[in-house]
Image: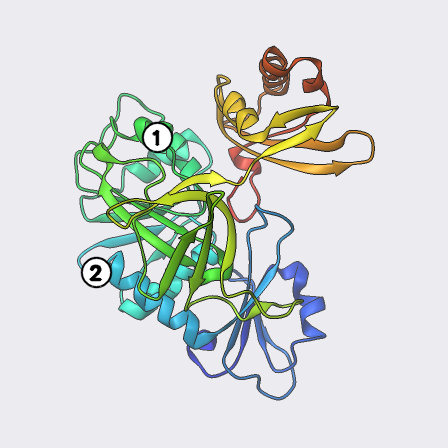
Amino acid sequence: MRAYQGGGSIAVASAARFDALRKRLAGWSLTDCTSRFETVAGPDAAGLLVMETSGTTGDPKLVRYRKDTVGRCARAIAEHLPVTPDREYIALVNPRFAYGMSIIHSHLAAGVPVRFCTPPVSADAWTGFRDHLTPETSVYLLPHQSFLLARDHDWSFDGAVELIFAGGMLTESMAARLRPSFPAATVVNMYGQAELGPRIAIGRSPLATFVEGDVGAPLPGVRVRITDDGHIEVDSDYRMLSYLDAGEVPRWWPTGDTGRIAADGHLHVSGRTAGDINFLGSRIELSALRRLTRAVPGVLDCRVWAVEHSVYGQQPSLRVLVEAPDTTAERRIRRALADEIGSSASAIVIDVVDMAALPDSGKL
């Protein structure tokens, strides 16, 4: 934190990147936000911050910011959550990535402490965590963590706990599981991307009346437009300078999401852009594959995308989250897909992971 608040430049990345970064970031400080911190010899590099994207929309990249830009976004986040000294803040996300870094920066801006804890990955570990909740607790979470948090149907907490979500889409099915366990909870639904500060919009509502996709109004300094085909584009005062290995970014950033702006000014996000693809001579709707997979018993969440294939043209790939290792999951998913799209389901790539096998970012 001293390195971040000082005048020098700092790169926050996995330790595996350190060798490559040392060769190109003379005078910078390097940290993995856990056990390693070092300063590369060389003239001081003034006022820049580099951090990793989570890689959920492709290979992990390094984004490059001015520290003052990050600071302005952090102050906007702290004001609009808001971060207040009367609450106890706990973060169950990796501090190295954009979501975790934004938590650190916004709490520094507000002068309010936050405690980062190792995310529980089993039902027993979640039980231990829940026992320490108070009505003044605010918890930073990833959406899929809601499944384990509400796993015990005989347990409930009546206090006004605040559940703060980012790093993915909070769905109605996730909220429905949480409601019996947290009848008085407030949910904060944050939307953003590592390239854009990272926060774009912040929505707040009682969990009881949560509306899927409603991420609230854009932050001051953030402008959102919807293209004719429903894609969300953002012009943000908090956007990055560039990727570390690329040039300037466009003014209107294509988020890769679809959505709409409601009459009250709130942004509603429908999901990732996932159109039809040409697969084995047929048109396949990726969003339909996601919907079918999520309906399979035992599946907590699913991410779907398409890759180019020399024989198939475009090949769907599914990354599926289950609670615990399940040797039957892939077979059951493939059977459910075959019932809808036929024999071509046999050529879909399906990667099943459990909560304990998620990457460092904690994202699917």
Reading the image, the residue beneath label 2 is 84
Left or right of 116, for residue 58: right
The coloring applied to the image is: rainbow
Q: Is residue 289 left or right of residue 216?
A: right
| Residue at position x 37%, y 31% in the image | 174
Q: Residues within 10 Å of mark 2 (few under 14, many from 20)?
A: some
**Picture coordinates of residue 37 (x, y %)?**
56, 70
Q: Quadrant of the C terminus?
A: top right
Residue 97 seen: no
Is the Cβ of the residue at disc 2 closer than 8 Å to that at disc 1?
no
Q: Amino acid at mark 1?
A: Glu
Which residue is labeled 1 in the image?
172
Q: Secondary structure at mark 2?
A: loop
Q: Residue furthest right?
A: 310
Point out the image quarter for the N terminus: bottom left
The amino acid type found where label 2 is placed reads: Thr
Q: Position of residue 66 (x, y in %)?
A: 49, 75
Q: Quadrant of residue 143?
A: top left
**Up-down relation of residue 85 to residue 93 (above or below):** below
